[in-house]
Amino acid sequence: MGGIDESALDRLSQVTDMTKHIRV
């Protein structure tokens, strides 16, 4: 798993959290 960087993962997590708030 070298394609996924920590920075990208952190950003993805943030986006997912925001989407969760908007969906719920």
Image (cartoon, rainbow, N blue to C red):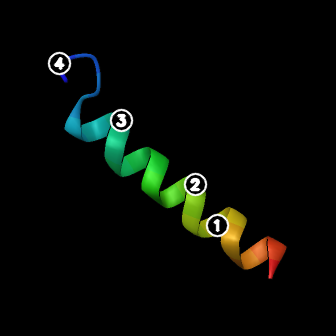
- Label 1, residues with CA under 10 Å away: few <14, some 14-19, many ≥20: few
Query: Amino acid under label 2?
Result: Val
* Place of residue 8 in the rendered image (x, y in percent of width and height, measured from the top left): 36, 35
The answer to whether the residue labelled 4 contacts the one labelled 2, judged by CB atoms less than 8 Å apart, is no
**Residue of label 2:** 15
* Place of residue 23 in the rendered image (x, y in percent of width and height, measured from the top left): 82, 72
- Label 2, residues with CA under 10 Å away: few <14, some 14-19, many ≥20: few
Q: Nearer the viewer, mark 3 or mark 4?
A: 4
Residue 8's label in the rendered image is 3
**Residue of label 4:** 2
N-terminal of the pair, mark 4 or mark 2, is 4
Query: Amino acid under label 3?
Result: Ala
In front of the other: 2 or 22:
2
Q: Nearer the viewer, mark 4 or mark 2?
A: 4
* Distance Cα–Cα, label 3 vs label 4: 11 Å
Tell whether 19 sits left or right of 16: right
Image vertical order of residue 8 relative to residue 16, above or below: above
Query: Amino acid under label 4?
Result: Gly
At x 80%, y 73%, the residue is: 22
N-terminal of the pair, mark 3 or mark 2, is 3
